[in-house]
Amino acid sequence: MFKPEVYKQRRTALYSQNLKGIALFFGNEESPMNYAANTYAYRQDSTFLYFFGLDMPGLAGVIDFDEEKEIIFGNDVDMEDIIWMGPQPKMTDNALKAGITHVEPFKNLEQFLKSALQKGREIHFLPQYRHDNKILLESLLGIAISKQKERASVALIKAVVNLRSVKDKYEIEELEKAAAIGYQMHVTSMKMAKPGIYEREIAGAIEGIALSQGAGVSFPIILSQNGQTLHNHDHSQVLEKGRLMVTDAGAETVLRYSSDFTRTVPVGGKFSQRQRDIYQIVLDANNAATAAVKPGITYKSVHLLASKVIASGLKNLGLMKGDVEEAVRNGAHAMFFPHGLGHMMGLDVHDMEDLGEDYVGYDEEVKRSDQFGIAYLRLGRRLKTGFVLTNEPGIYFIPELISLWKSENKFTDFINYAKVEEYIGFGGIRLEDDLLVTEHGCKLIGKRVPITIDEVEETMRD
Ligand code: GLY
């Protein structure tokens, strides 16, 4: 955990967000895989970690805005727990690590909330994503699961997003650690990408790095020579010489901060000319985005800038045609780049996505577009110093999408389908870095994973 002062300062900052009543935060419980005692790796809720730091099941936290008081609800272990888990600190000692002196047994939460309701106090809660917490919320507050999303406190969501979006120096140190683990994962992946090896051998090896140096991966590893499928979790293929392999993977530190990098490498270590051409366009888009990121700019405009670099590069290769600005305005490039440029990152790899993507990535000024491609952009709003985000442009040749758009005669003024069809089987290329928005621009988090064509081939040669 960070020092108690860090958590106290975060709760103090929440008090200054002008909320009244009580905020109720659930921690996460263990989650069974195939029977109750055989659980998935435990993952605490990120907002709970942010305000209370305690990375264990069986907890709820209350912040009382009117009395400026905080309570942890949780039980001390009993003898049976000690027999199976070993001795554990008392809950009062745990709470002190987060700077909290008021601890109650978990069963007292029900009476506490009942009494608050009787007094007509407002109880703020965040959207719930775990089924057991939805059931708990229904039983404690009498709010049907089907109504919980609409009854979640928008004021609390906005306050939490305000605070968590701007990373402090302790968080940035953690993010740097996550990036260092991610670096090793990706370099290992590059070096292992040899013909004849199963994708799962590489995925397993790099997951092992994440587990041995931190809390594991920040999301299930995406690793495939079928990189045209954006989130390909199937690792059953044997790598073939001449194919491209996409690795999209990151680590979580012990304190649960994330990294998220993507690299694409030629199986066997040497890019073909066609691969080099497409790769360089994606790299140019990535570099242009990094050069543009600074406080005050909207990430939507950076996404559009990267899209124009992609459309222009594809036009130079004869895959697109016509006016680049117009093509991008109409979304023609999205056949090749059908996703957003990036998302916020922090305690979650898609930071705060549980609170609602539009609260995190959009605001009154910048609204989400419904145009195919940019509709998937998770972060569109103006950037501020301290934001941490991913920059992940890509070019993909998705046979099913190409064939659908061709059959619909879609964007024939901008897409040269005859030429595009020569690329069926190419796969996809995505290149992703993590950026911290600084006072005047941005900086990469961590040492940059080898990314130029020469750097990648050199790394794979070792
Ligand atoms: N890098 C995986 C994702 O952004 O979903």
Image: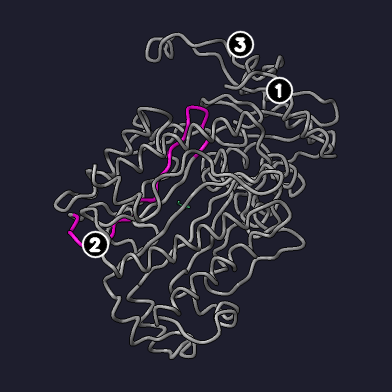
Image position, residue 427 (x, y; %): 31, 66
State the residue at coordinates (52%, 46%).
434
Q: Secondary structure at mark 2?
A: loop
The residue labelled by disc 1 is 71
Q: Secondary structure at mark 3?
A: helix
Q: CA distance from mark 1 to mark 3?
A: 13 Å
The earlier-in-sequence mark between 2 and 1 is 1
Start and end of the magenta stretch?
A: 239-258
State the residue at coordinates (81%, 39%).
17
Q: Is residue 339 left or right of residue 17?
A: left
Q: Residues within 10 Å of mark 3 (few under 14, many from 20)?
A: some
Q: Is residue 229 above or below residue 432?
A: below
The three-letter amino acid code for the residue at tag 1 is Ile
Q: Is residue 243 above or below residue 124?
A: below
The residue labelled by disc 2 is 243
Q: Residues within 10 Å of mark 1 (few under 14, many from 20)?
A: some
Image position, residue 260 (x, y; %): 46, 45
The three-letter amino acid code for the residue at tag 2 is Arg
Q: Secondary structure at mark 1?
A: strand
The residue labelled by disc 3 is 93
Q: Nearer the viewer, residue 213 or 308?
A: 308
Label 3 C-beta lies within 8 Å of the nearest ligand 1 atom? no
Q: Residues within 10 Å of mark 2 (few under 14, many from 20)?
A: many
Q: Is residue 282 left or right of residue 69?
A: left
Q: Is residue 459 above or below residue 6?
A: below
Which quarter of the rendered picture does the N terminus lie within? top right
The nearer-to-camera label among 1 and 3 is 3
The earlier-in-sequence mark between 1 and 3 is 1
